[in-house]
Image: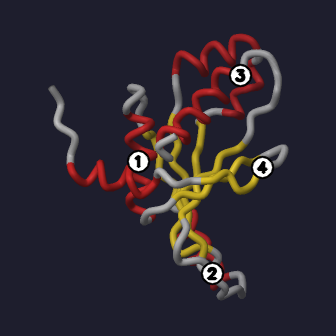
Amino acid sequence: MMKVKPLFGAVMFLVLATVAIAQSDYVHVAKARGTFAEVKESLVRAIEDRGLVVNNTAHVGLMLDRTGRDLGSNGQIYREAEVIEFCSAKISRAMMEQDPQSIVLCPYGISVYTLRSQTDAVYLAYRRFPAVPGVKAAADLVEAIVNDALGQ
């Protein structure tokens, strides 16, 4: 039997209190409690628990900080911001067999970030998938991963 690490239990306790805060035609955002590192760990675990592999972590916050100076902007948007990218070969293949142009939806990405102006919130956000044939399974997968990461 697998032992649950005490840290993971603490992380899950911290992220249990969440609320969806923004929804639009293109994005879903949920607010989580806990530190950036704890919420990111929960997200990665939710991906890996499905047998999927994180294939890239885009350090968006660092890139914006670095390039902002070159562009004449010294305003920091995020305290921390990363996009965790992953894919499901099975779901993506089925999606692309129905519509090869759906390649633009892969890899799937879930953003985890904190805002400079807020010290008590971590956000998880993802793009909404279009309501076209073959894409529902990918949309359901991303939503389920976020819900698992949030302890819902």
Q: Mark 1 points at which residue?
A: 42
Disc 1 residue type?
Answer: Ser
Measuring 63% from the left and 53% from the top, which residue is drawn there? 19
Mark 1 or mark 2, earlier in chain: 1
- The crowd level at tag 1 (other Cα within 10 Å; few <14, some 14-19, many 20+) is many
Q: In this view, does 142 lie above or below 11?
A: above
Disc 4 residue type?
Answer: Gln
Q: Which of labels 1 and 3 is toward the front? A: 1
Mark 4 or mark 1, earlier in chain: 4
**SS type, badge 4:** strand
Name which quarter of the figure residue 52 lies in.
top left
Q: Name the residue under label 3.
A: 136
Mark 1 or mark 3, earlier in chain: 1
Circle on res. 117: 2
**Do the numbered discs 2 and 3 sit on residues whose CB atoms are within 8 Å?**
no
In space, the residues marked 4 and 1 are separated at their CA atoms by 22 Å
Q: Is residue 152 left or right of residue 75?
A: left
**Do the numbered discs 2 and 4 sit on residues whose CB atoms are within 8 Å?**
no
Measuring 84% from the left and 44% from the top, which residue is drawn there? 25
**SS type, badge 3:** helix
In space, the residues marked 3 and 4 are separated at their CA atoms by 17 Å
**SS type, badge 2:** loop
Q: Name the residue under label 4.
A: 23
- Residue 33, position as x, y percentages in the image: 49, 61
Mark 2 or mark 3, earlier in chain: 2
In space, the residues marked 2 and 3 are separated at their CA atoms by 35 Å
**Do the numbered discs 1 and 2 sit on residues whose CB atoms are within 8 Å?**
no
Q: Is residue 20 above or below residue 121?
A: above
- The crowd level at tag 3 (other Cα within 10 Å; few <14, some 14-19, many 20+) is some
In space, the residues marked 1 and 2 are separated at their CA atoms by 23 Å
